[in-house]
Amino acid sequence: MNALAPAETLWRAMTPTRMLDCGMDYADILELQTLTGAGIAWDVAAEELGDRQRARARAAAEAGRVVTAEEAYLAATACYLFAQMAYNFDGPRKRELYTRLTDAFEAAGASRNPRWEHVGIPFAGGRLFGWLIRPPSPVTGTVVVFGGQSGWGPAYVRQAEALNRRGLAALLAEGPGQGESRLEGGVLLDVDVRAAYSAFVDHVLARGGLGPVGLWGNSNGGLFAGTTAASDRRVAAVCVNGGPARPRLLDFRTYAEQAAAMLGTTDTDAIRRNFDRIALKPEDRIDCPVLVLHGGRDPIVAEADQKPFLDAATHDDTTLRIWDDGEHTIYNHATERTAYVADWFADRLARRD
């Protein structure tokens, strides 16, 4: 069940544009192409690149070069992120690589002021995990950022830093079936997903001085963002980036295996029923500002798949932004996309009473 897919399959799922968006160094991407082309297993090659970056980080830290160390730890984090993505199902190897990812990310944020905070929230008999990343300046609001079937938490550090530069904090959340929340917290996608993401909102508001709260969901995370905003009136603004309102089991090996791992079953009927359970409902209404992003060349999510979020919006401030040549979640315009969304949240959260 946990066999490694062929390199060409993994390259389709983890494109260079996606790697750049998640903070991988371009030289590491090229080296990964060389190594996997030579027949080295994907996870071994990516792990080796991460280990090199981590060694560079430690040497820089010992020499007192804090900024260089932080940059290298982030580069290592990205390498480990894509190393563990080689395994869709859980097992010792995926857990080992995810631990390396988490440790490198924690080391990257150790020198920040304020230090990046590893958050654990009790939920459904387990724990939800995330990273609270705050700017040094006063906080005008917080955006909870999350992914869908793969690439969680630290994958969105560039979005967090863009939000920080605009005075917003970011909580990089790993929800049900995602990252540490699944691997260590034991929370799968069979729980009340809306309540789970509301638990992240609870955490932010309970801290004081971090609200109001927005949600930024990417890929299937866009579904989680939209449905949570429909259920939780405390959400002040929501961005859906490449998310289907009514998910379905796609005919891609990677997608199907990831969906199975998130739910904890390979029963396709059970996965389909769960997708129906967590979908946006016809009666759902979203009462806060809504931003929907779509890539015209997205092979996974069509514009029509996202239209129900716009139909559910009752607020006058509702926007659809399309990149005609955009890939899934707009990987190939990542810098522009991130700036656009961060500006959008800064405007909405700063003016919120």
Image (cartoon, rainbow, N blue to C red):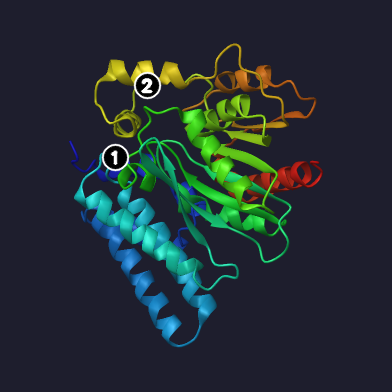
Does label 2 or label 1 sit earlier along the sequence? 1
Q: Which quadrant of the figure has residue 40?
A: bottom left
Amino acid at circle 1: Asn
The one of 60 and 280 positioned closer to us in this rendering: 280
Task: Tell me the element at label 2.
Answer: loop
> What distance separates the C-alpha of mark 2 from that of mark 1?
15 Å
Q: In this view, does 343 lie to the left or right of 188?
A: right
Q: In which quarter of the image is the C terminus?
A: top right
Residue drawn at x 60%, y 70% as measured from the top left: 113
Mark 2 touching mark 1, by CB under 8 A? no
Residue projecting furthest to the bottom: 63
Q: In which quarter of the image is the N terminus?
A: top left
Q: In this view, does 237 lie to the left or right of 69?
A: right
Residue corresponding to mark 2: 249
Residue drawn at x 38%, y 53% as measured from the top left: 81
Q: Is residue 274 left or right of residue 323?
A: left
Residue 218 appearing in the image: no
Residue corresponding to mark 1: 88
Residue 142 appearing in the image: yes
Q: Is residue 136 left or right of residue 2?
A: right
The one of 186 and 347 positioned closer to us in this rendering: 186
Residue 186 on image: x %, y %: 32, 40
Residue drawn at x 45%, y 51% as measured from the top left: 19
Task: Tell me the element at label 1.
Answer: loop
Residue 216 on image: x %, y %: 59, 40
**Local crowd at mark 2 within 10 Å, few (<14), some, or many (≥20)?**
some
The one of 17 and 48 positioned closer to us in this rendering: 48
The one of 118 and 101 positioned closer to us in this rendering: 118
Residue 283 on image: x %, y %: 61, 12
Residue 106 on image: x %, y %: 44, 64
Amino acid at circle 2: Leu
| Residue 236 circle label | none
